[in-house]
Image (cartoon, rainbow, N blue to C red):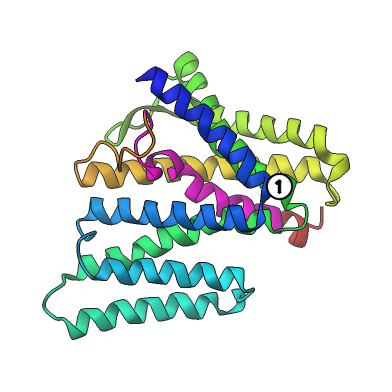
Amino acid sequence: MFGKRLVSGIILVILAVLVVGLGGIPLFITSLIISLIGQFELYRALGIDHKSIAAIGYMSSIVYYLLIWFEGRSYMAAMITATLMVFMAAYVITFPEYKTEEITAGFFGVCYVSVMMSYLYLTRQLPDGKYLVWLIFLSSWGCDTAAYCAGMLLGRHKMTPSLSPKKTWEGAIGGVLGAALLGALFAYFFSDDMGIESPMFSCVFACGVGAVISQIGDLAASAIKRNHNIKDYGRIIPGHGGILDRFDSMLFTAPAIYYAISFAVNILHI
């Protein structure tokens, strides 16, 4: 299992470097594919993957991404509202075929997977996005590694014993500090190439915030699995499980980095 996990991890890193580095169409298509696969995995866990409302979720995600591609971001709020209305219309028209929780699960899948994952592409499209997008990986995967090491060495106090018994507060703090340190190192090497006024602060701030949020994302995905008695969301990535098993924290980190950078640059003006 360790060998499979290591090889898969190396391949994922190589693919991430290539696709994210290229940006544009390759990253857009990859983000959409990951979103749809992750959405399917979630729907399967929630027991609605074989039902027609799942198709509404998939089509909504595709429309959402098309709005991004065709610069229709001003219509995104309207699109999310319309998606909810379509789900509710299906609920009413087919009543009593679906339960309330199935309709809410369908809508939840669009927001939780596709909307959140889209921020990987949106961050890449920012000014200096070709640099800033890597903060998503540093704060997500970097936090995971730092938290694991800190937890193994210093972990004493359980954070969520009923949900994830091995996670400790010491590990969580170590993960945040480790991600912030990676952000500082990234800014040190690439600050001269970025146009923002204070890349050191922005990168450290974004990675720190992203690391906190990434751990919530990881635990949220675990909570869903616990509630539905599944070990992994899928088997598409050998040694890692499904798309959601590997990208669970990134779903939260991507929007966190996007808005942390926007806050630091546009609100704090630093």
Q: What residue appears at the point 38 percent right and 40 percent down from the top-left corner?
A: 245
What range of the chain is rendered magenta? 239-262
The residue under the point 20% across, 61% down is: 50
Q: Amino acid at mark 1?
A: Leu
**Residue 173 location (% of width, % of height):** 54, 30
Measured along the vertical axis of the image, is residue 21 above or below residue 241? below
Asked if residue 134 lies left or right of residue 229, the reply is right
Q: Which residue is mark 1?
A: 132
Q: Position of residue 186 (x, y in %)?
A: 74, 34
Is most of the magenta stretch helix, strand or loop?
helix
Is 31 on the left-hand or right-hand side of 217? right
Residue at figure coordinates x 66%, y 42% from the top left:
134
Q: Is residue 144 above or below residue 86?
A: above
Quick one: 98 or 161, which is closer to the camera? 98
Q: How many marks?
A: 1
State which quadrant residue 105 falls in. bottom left
Does residue 206 appear in the picture of this structure? no
Task: Tell which of 133 and 32 is nearer to you.
Answer: 32
**At 54% across and 38% down in the image, what residue appears?**
140
Left or right of 49, for residue 110: right
Look at the image and tell me in which quarter the N terminus lies.
Answer: top left
As helix, strand or loop, the secondary structure at mark 1 comes to helix
- Asked if residue 61 shows in the view, the reply is yes
